[in-house]
Amino acid sequence: MQALPDLSIRQLEYLVAVSTAPSWSVAADSVGVSASALSQGLAELERRVGVPLFERNGRRRILRSGAEPVLAHARQVVALTGDLATWAERVRSGRSGRLRVGMIDAAAVGHYPETLRHFRADHSDLDFTLHVAPSGALLDLVEAGELDMVVCVAPPEAGMRPGIELEELFVEPLAVFTPSGRLPRVSNRWGPWVLFAAGSHTRAVVEAALVELGAPLDIVAESNQPEVLRTMVSLGVGATALPMVQATGLGPGKVIAERRLVVATRRGAAGDPAVEALRDALRVSAPSSPSVAASSNGGVPT
Amino acid sequence: MQALPDLSIRQLEYLVAVSTAPSWSVAADSVGVSASALSQGLAELERRVGVPLFERNGRRRILRSGAEPVLAHARQVVALTGDLATWAERVRSGRSGRLRVGMIDAAAVGHYPETLRHFRADHSDLDFTLHVAPSGALLDLVEAGELDMVVCVAPPEAGMRPGIELEELFVEPLAVFTPSGRLPRVSNRWGPWVLFAAGSHTRAVVEAALVELGAPLDIVAESNQPEVLRTMVSLGVGATALPMVQATGLGPGKVIAERRLVVATRRGAAGDPAVEALRDALRVSAPSSPSVAASSNGGVPT
DNA sequence: GCTTTTGTAAAGCAAATCTGAACTATTGTG
DNA sequence: CACAATAGTTCAGATTTGCTTTACAAAAGC
């Protein structure tokens, strides 16, 4: 490949302007520079292309007949750049491009269904996909570049996922629910348990809390589906610990712990406008958001 | 019209280089500037486009998945500028220059060997190279500016290659050939098949036709080499579908479809007389050319 | 002949871009 | 784990580019 001349879009615009305007001065005006700049710019373009582009007819300079290829090139590149600019404008406003989001079930159907609905409506040009899975799997997908952002439970240890950046959305209480609806006074008589499956972030939080409270860890069944846990409790298999949003129909519970819901993104992937737009929407509609002006409901006692 | 970002060809070259080279340092080398300049230039490009283009993964910076449109733009503009440069070079020196042609095998050795021989003889000062490959690869090379024109099978969908301009040369029938030389009356007993490899334009045409006819798509072997397909048929492995010119020695076939052979050039490429000359030659000697005055020789029997 | 219009040249200045060196973070190695 | 090599970035300084203003010269219009 030969060395390419270092043309600039600006110069090509000059050429296009000159080809349409009746005189160079108005062309200069139309691109918003002085006549002198236009003249110099075109002289430079001519020099760089290395082929004479103009010939003088009296005072005016007119495009040489042999130079239409250059003009055609200029037109095309300017048009393409215009396309690029409008594309960029749409992406910049978060209205275009692709956004692959992951959420845990509680977030997708419990906390944020309305937020998601609105977001999708507001960004109809966006190629939006939502993937629902447990926290660990979601974070794996973020690390692998398969998802752009996820809403999940904060991992047990802080520095565990070096490639991932977390931002806290809100803290969600976890409560114990028993088949009878009552809970023994002394915690060492609690149980047996029906919990989220081992490996789950929420399970880790619950286990830590139970140990802390001195309750025996007698686990008789596991599932990552809250529906399954609820049914087990109803059937009297054991007690469970769930976030409120997933405990419908289980009567009042006793709050024993809390989990942190976070937005996770790949470290270094900052700045995607679509990601930022959704992150903002999530922040705004977070239940009992930490320090934002108080939302009317939200008071979950800890 | 909005204000266009003032991108320079240089910056677009950087982007293309980075997308090809294994690391930024070698990319910098390949465009002949310091690594520092490349880094700054790309940062500037990113700023001007106004959309984040890169993502850091460890110490490498990798193109963001959402940024292919920018890369595509860069590729196209760089290729067009390359065309402009060769055009300018030709004008400057008055010589005819270079012509890099691509053809599918059937065109190169089946339909146009004589045309090519004559053309090369008539333009002995032309630096002529012929590259034989499947249609898809050829179109990629045209888009990348590596070839000036190609003769290939029209892509399955019309608007698939926006940067490429097609002109139909002729329509070529595709026929089925079986080991026995006979073909069952009912199409649902046809097969099994030995076809061009998946991804091939001709394969797509054949598959569509077979589905249309109700024949089962039982594919037992694939190759892009017609020689291989012929041998397989001879060995009784299965039936195939080929253009006539590539079916020597396979007995009479049954025409089931047709493919369109086209000349493809970069859209908007600066008019190259050599390209036009060859295009004319191809038109004139096209088998059963649509409406052109009959050429004396050239008769490849259909 | 004189003014107006149109394009060019010169001078000065601000911004862009390059190089080389110092610097940081990651990766590889003994 | 220290230590060096590698990849990329940042910084300072020099060079180049591009623009504006000003001045000027060649038609065109009166």
Image (tube, coloured by chain):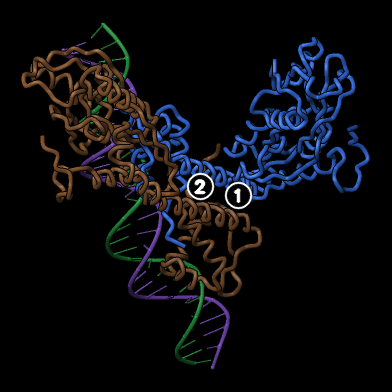
Chain colours: A brown, B blue, C green, D purple
- Locate residue B98, reporting x and y percent: 67, 39
- Locate residue A96, reporting x and y percent: 43, 47
Badge 1 vs badge 2, beta-carbon distance below 8 Å: yes
Residue under pointer 1: B88
* Chain letter belonging to callout 2: A
Q: Give the crowd class for mark 1: few <14, some 14-19, many >=20 residues within 10 Å.
A: many
* Chain letter belonging to callout 1: B
Q: Residue furthest left?
A: A186
- From what the image shows, is residue B121 above or below residue B268? above
Q: Secondary structure at mark 1?
A: helix
B246 sits left or right of A161 in the view: right
The residue depicted at 58 percent of the width and 53 percent of the height is A73
Give, as a three-letter code, the residue at label 1: Ala
Residue B44 in view of the camera: no
The residue depicted at 67 percent of the width and 37 percent of the height is B155
Residue under pointer 2: A5
Along the line of sight, which residue is nearer the eye, A61 or A256?
Answer: A256
Q: Quadrant of the C terminus of chain A?
A: top left
Give, as a three-letter code, the residue at label 2: Pro
The residue depicted at 43 percent of the width and 45 percent of the height is A126
D26 sits left or right of B6 in the view: right
- Locate residue B25, reporting x and y percent: 38, 30
Residue A135 in view of the camera: yes
State how far apart marks 1 and 2 are (Cα).
10 Å
Q: Secondary structure at mark 2?
A: loop
- From what the image shows, is residue B93 above or below residue A170? below
- From what the image shows, is residue B196 above or below residue B123? above
B176 sits left or right of B218 in the view: right
